[in-house]
Image: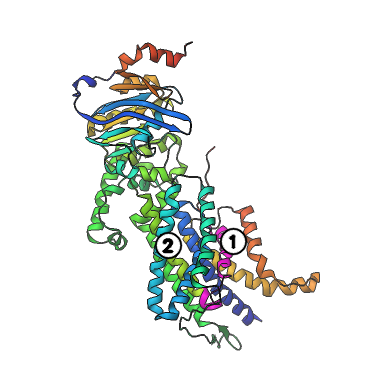
Amino acid sequence: MRASAGPDVAAGDVLLSVGGVSLSFGGVTALADVSFDIRKGEIRAIIGPNGAGKTSMLNVINGFYRPQHGRITFRGQTRATMRPYDAAHGGIARTFQNVALFRGMTALDNIMAGRTLKMHRGFLWQIIRVGPAQSEEVAHRLKVEEIIDFLEIPHIRRIPVGRLPYGLQKRVELGRALAMEPDLLLLDEPMAGMNLEEKEDMSRYIVDVNDHFGTTIALIEHDMGVVMDLSDRVVVLEYGRKIADGTPNEVKSDQKVIDAYLGVKH
Amino acid sequence: MLGPIFETLIGGLLTGVLYSLVALGFVLIFKASGVFNFAQGAMVLFAALSLARLSEVMPFLAALALTVLIMIALAYAIEFLVLRHLVNQEGIILFMATLGVAYFLDGFGQTIWGSDIYKIDLGLPKNPVFILESVFAGGLLIDPSELIAAVICAVLVAVLAVFFQFTRVGRALRAVADDHQAAQSVGIPLDHIWLMVWAVAGIVALVAGMMWGAKLGVQFSLALVALKALPVLILGGFTSIPGAIVGGLIIGAGEKLAEVLLGPVLIRWFDLAGGGIENWFAYMLALMFLLFRPQGLFGEKIIERV
């Protein structure tokens, strides 16, 4: 567990909470009555065996899925479903399990795309590229360059992302999410398919984002070592149900969690 | 000898410009949404019909303005009634949806406007003129209205190319084309982007329909011109605006030259009838490209990690 962990985060400062969320596709239940909250400034891990509903949970939070029951409260506003645009507008950014980048575009353009909602000048100004629109573009570009430096990827700026190795693609995707300057960052298996060195780099970026920018992070991860090191609190899902919720140490010694991971005869 | 060949070449290039215009509509929508819009040909016909019939009852410019509004309304209807409900679906499903839109529009246009042959009169000079009389004996015969069509097309293309390549909206369009979900996750409003790109494609269809209509008369066969746009797309690449232009020119010039040059060879050496080359040449060329350069002349190289 991290040194700056949970207890000093006041229980009242809830940034987002989901209450009684149920989601099913046809007859298949993806989530069943799941409730938990994410506190401002924490790193919250969502773990569970394959098919536990972790990605579905993220998709509900940023509006790709509409749950049949339950509600989502974000910054004190409660609603039954989010629309992806509203989620992005409200400050929720995310990455995807199987890297979803704009493959034909350069790393720089991908990260610039993250600035979409921060740009205000109308597109007519944009076309003629003068005055306010021009200086706005420059300001955004500076911000993006900061992110590029932070993620240590200046050398790949001009390369179409489809040509980059997987680890770097993941980093560009994180960069695009950071360019949104989100309040809540959702990371879907940020370290999947990475080697040890890449995992260590990615862990460092996640901790830095959390420490320096105060960004609240919710992440899905399979590597238990990473989860225990990074997160302040962990929620455990199994077959779409929440089976545990607490600090990494609490969760680690929970019998239901041990059973879920090791398998047990019922 | 050289004179007639040049004449054929120029005639072919000018026809090619019109192919390019139709192909451009396909490229726009494919770039922005990854949808192969089978309805582009039907949109060309619908726009031309609207323009032809409206200009019978009002001044041409008023009819043109009204047709632009009709095409924007049509784009809105397609987005609102069809596409919005199919977000994040497979490409083949979106393709089938445009197939439905195409046949609906073909019929609906005739329901509203009638199914005779109508005229569009652009007031352009119709009489062919001779140029370059000093270079070739007798000069070259060209149709000035086709030349004007080429200029209009060139301007349209330049504007669109700049729009896509250098503006923020263009970047958003390319983002949507690459990955719907990722685009949504950074807050690009999918519905606005689609509405805009279908509206632009509708206006491009109007320009194409206007030019073809003025040349051939407005009739149902106009929708079939769209089928010529397919080989153009395969040559130029589905995502490239310059590709649509160059592809159109190559197909236009190629099929006319093939008719004139290849025809006599087939007749004399192989004792064939020799006609109809214009009908299959474009598709043959497209087939060759599919075999040897499937991404087209300008298409983005297909990179697939396995």
Name the amino acid type tagged 1.
Pro
Q: Do the residues labelled 1 and 2 touch (CB within 8 Å)?
A: no
Whole-number angstrom distance, CA of label 1 to CA of label 2: 27 Å
Q: Where is residue B265 in the image (x, y as percent from the top left)?
A: 75, 72
Say which residue appears at 43% left-offset and 13% top-offset.
Answer: A259
Could you say which disc has been placed on residue A177 in the image? none
Instruction: Determine crowd level at label 2: few under 14, some 14-19, many 20+ residues with C-alpha closer than 10 A.
Output: some
Q: How many labels does the image show?
A: 2
Magenta span main SS? helix
Q: Which residue is nearer to you in this view: A12 or B24?
A: A12
Q: Quadrant of residue B269?
A: bottom right
**Residue designated by label 2:** B74
Image quarter (top left, top right, bottom left or bottom right) of the N terminus of chain B: bottom right
Say which residue appears at 53% left-offset and 42% top-offset.
Answer: B304
Task: Report if residue B244 is visible in the image.
Answer: no
Q: Where is residue B153 in the image (x, y as percent from the top left)?
A: 46, 71
Is B117 drawn above or below residue A248 in the view shown?
A: below
Image quarter (top left, top right, bottom left or bottom right) of the C terminus of chain B: top right
Q: What element carries label 1?
A: helix
Is B55 drawn above or below residue A260 in the view shown?
A: below
